[in-house]
Image: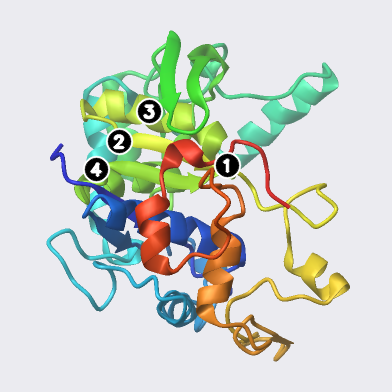
């Protein structure tokens, strides 16, 4: 991996960009600019069922209005494109097959009905069903079938998924905000990496794209912390150098209980979006900070202080001053109201 700093903001176009997403984009932007690095926008649109018309344009308009434009991404092609996952989908299967070759993944032919029965059996015993090292040999997969049977099923057109086979060990990880983390990998399930519809799951696509786009630091929301161990194991299985990880604290409701949502803003009379959004299906209009009369500089100043503190008395910063002052070691690990 090169020593240059490359970070990415990778939203899904499933609706308008929430201020939590803007704050994640902002912290990536500040970190990139502080280190003369590159800020990449990647649109994670593999889930076509949840795709919302106009959401990608909204994301780009919101970043531009906030004065945190991306250096590489849709419409600003660099050497690591394309920057929409849907335009990269032909490449993911080969990576999943590479993991099978390495013994780090396997074909699974279990039907939805078989998995449902296994779930019901576990529930009857008051257990939670997890497909992992404890029971993978009880199922119909390439670990229990002969290579001839596997080939025959694939040639016949049987549905299959490709599942990850995590190495069993104590995994030592480091988060730039939360510091040292240890996890027993026997607790991780055999996640599906490649689905029967020919699309990768989020986990495979995310790791492959971050590697291919030479991302040096993955700065993302705390909700992805539980996925960190799986992603680190995938990097190790591919034999790739892992990026540095930093998981940002959540933006909480004003009461401090739970993650801030659009409904909280509606109830309490404030916006949770940078710009006005009109839902293409319902026609419902949600107000934005811009329409409420806020300057982008004001909104950025507010968001910067949600989870970060420069450690000085200064409260009003220009964007350039934020770039100079920003560092990940001043980001808090607890949620910000």
The residue indicated by pointer 4 is: 211
> Label 1, label 4: how many angstroms apart (C-alpha)?
21 Å
| Number of other residues with Cα within 10 Å of mark 3, as a class: few under 14, some 14 to 19, many 20 or more | some
Q: Earlier in the sequence, mark 1 or mark 3?
A: 1
Q: Is residue 296 above or below residue 181?
A: below
Compare residues 307 and 280 and report the one nearer the observer.
307
Compare residues 5 and 304 and report the one nearer the observer.
304
The residue indicated by pointer 1 is: 222
Which image quadrant for residue 315?
bottom right
The residue indicated by pointer 2 is: 243
Spot occupied by residue 308 in the image (x, y as percentages of width and height) = 55, 47
Nearest to the eye among marks 4 and 2: give it: 2
Q: Residue at x 29, y 58 (%)?
A: 33
Q: Earlier in the sequence, mark 1 or mark 2?
A: 1
> Label 3, label 4: how many angstroms apart (C-alpha)?
12 Å
| Number of other residues with Cα within 10 Å of mark 1, as a class: few under 14, some 14 to 19, many 20 or more | some
| Number of other residues with Cα within 10 Å of mark 2, as a class: few under 14, some 14 to 19, many 20 or more | many
Q: Residue at x 65, y 39 (%)?
A: 113
Whether residue 298 appears in this view of the structure is: yes
> Label 1, label 3: how many angstroms apart (C-alpha)?
16 Å
Nearest to the eye among marks 1 and 3: give it: 1
> Label 4, label 2: how many angstroms apart (C-alpha)?
8 Å
């Amino acid at each position: 991996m090169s020593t240059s700093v490359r970070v990415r903001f990778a939203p899904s176009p499933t609706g308008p960009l929430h201020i939590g997403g803007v704050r994640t984009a902002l912290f990536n932007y500040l970190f990139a600019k502080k280190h003369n690095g590159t800020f990449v926008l990647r649109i994670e649109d593999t889930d076509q069922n949840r795709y919302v018309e106009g959401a990608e344009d909204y994301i780009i308009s919101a970043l531009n209005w906030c004065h945190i434009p991306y250096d590489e991404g849709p419409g600003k092609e660099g050497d690591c494109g394309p920057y929409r996952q849907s335009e990269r989908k032909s490449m993911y299967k080969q990576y999943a097959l590479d993991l099978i070759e390495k013994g780090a993944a396997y074909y699974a032919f279990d039907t939805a009905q078989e998995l449902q029965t296994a779930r019901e059996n576990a529930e009857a015993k008051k257990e939670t069903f997890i497909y992992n090292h404890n029971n993978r040999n009880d199922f119909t997969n390439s670990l229990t079938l002969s290579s001839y049977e596997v080939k025959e099923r694939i040639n016949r057109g049987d549905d299959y998924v490709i599942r990850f086979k995590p190495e069993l060990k104590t995994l030592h990880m480091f988060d730039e905000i939360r510091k040292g983390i240890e996890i027993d990998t026997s607790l991780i399930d055999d996640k599906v990496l490649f689905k029967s519809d020919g699309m990768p799951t989020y986990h495979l696509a995310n790791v492959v794209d971050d590697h291919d786009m030479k991302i040096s630091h993955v700065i993302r929301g705390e909700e992805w912390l539980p996925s960190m161990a799986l992603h680190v194991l995938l990097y190790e299985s591919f034999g790739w150098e892992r990026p540095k990880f930093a998981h940002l604290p959540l933006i909480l409701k004003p009461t401090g209980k739970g993650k801030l949502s659009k409904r909280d803003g509606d109830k309490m009379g404030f916006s949770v979006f940078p710009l006005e959004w009109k839902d293409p299906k319902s026609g419902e209009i949600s107000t934005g900070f811009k329409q409420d009369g806020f300057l982008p500089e004001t909104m950025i100043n507010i968001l910067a202080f949600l989870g970060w503190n420069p450690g000085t008395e200064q409260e009003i910063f220009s964007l350039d001053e934020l770039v100079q002052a920003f560092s990940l070691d001043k980001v808090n690990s607890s949620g910000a109201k």
